[in-house]
Image (tube, rainbow, N blue to C red):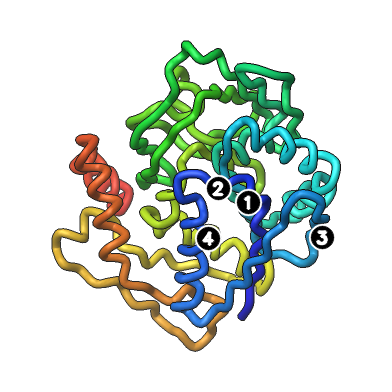
Amino acid sequence: MTLTLGHLYPDQLNLYGDRGNILTLKRRCELRGIELRVVGLGIGDALAPDEYDLLFIGGGQDKEQAPVAQDLFETKGIGLWAAIEDDMPVLAVCGGYQLLAHYYRPAEGPDMKGLGVFDAWTVHKGPRTPRCIGDVVIRWNGMTVVGFENHGGRTYLGTAHPLGKVLKGYGNNAEDGTEGAVYRNAYGTYLHGSLLPKNPHFADHLIGLALQRKYGLRRLTSLSMPPGEIMNGSTPAQPASMEDPTTLLRPLDDHLEWQAHAAILERLGLYEEAVAALRRAKAA
């Protein structure tokens, strides 16, 4: 099996190790015998949605976002919209997230028009307003997702569904407890480069969506170990059958990934709470 990932603006939007998300996807695919081709799409490159199975766009500084915003709207907008409406999985981080909403109003300069994929908008309230910086933990699908955020803009959701609820950190705007936004299989978030390396369950979610869309994967088994099982030395559960590669994602040893995840939970005093929530979800 082969998947093709389109990396939008790799030279302009790549802060705090955002490229690590792509490395994680590529490695997790390779370990399962899936080839992940990565194609960079810079300013001026058209986006043909039929050529890709996943899309990624990272974050950048305001001065780098301005030319990207124009190109995104004028050159790639139609293709990107078509891909998202066709349920292609898309991960957009920080500046990329902001430009998939209606607009970003920077502290200085004119508004940057976005694509309006997410019914949301972002306003930078000026250099005297503290930035949202630090480790962040959110609740997503009954599990925790950890990351690092650093953004001056505050994003406000209209009808868009948030990616998760903030347990620690700032999230979209440090006011309403929301983080990120979701539309179909497009995910916007402020969680930077440690997102997929420290959250193997979210990485597998994206891979599974891409396989489901391209190959008709019928069932995705979550085989990543949650934090509560790391301390017990557990090993990943094995699937009932590996005969049909389109029905399962082969399990991986995610000890290191979950240890990194748990380290953030412990640092923020959320480890016990996260484990208890997982046990409740498992018992339900």
Which amino acid type is marked by label 2? Asn
Provide the residue designation for mark 1: 11
User: Which badge, 4 or 2, comes first in the chain's sequence?
Assistant: 2
Provide the residue designation for mark 4: 22
Q: Position of residue 243 (x, y in %)?
A: 49, 88
Q: Residue at x 53, y 82 (%)?
A: 245
Q: Tags 1 and 2 in contact by the CB under 8 Å rule?
A: yes
Provide the residue designation for mark 3: 48
Which amino acid type is marked by label 4? Ile
Which amino acid type is marked by label 1? Asp
Q: Residue at x 64, y 60 (%)?
A: 54
Which amino acid type is marked by label 3? Ala
Query: Element type at marker 3?
Result: loop
Q: Residue at x 80, y 65 (%)?
A: 50
The dot on residue 14 is 2
CA distance separating discs 3 and 1: 20 Å
Mark toward the viewer: 4 or 2:
2
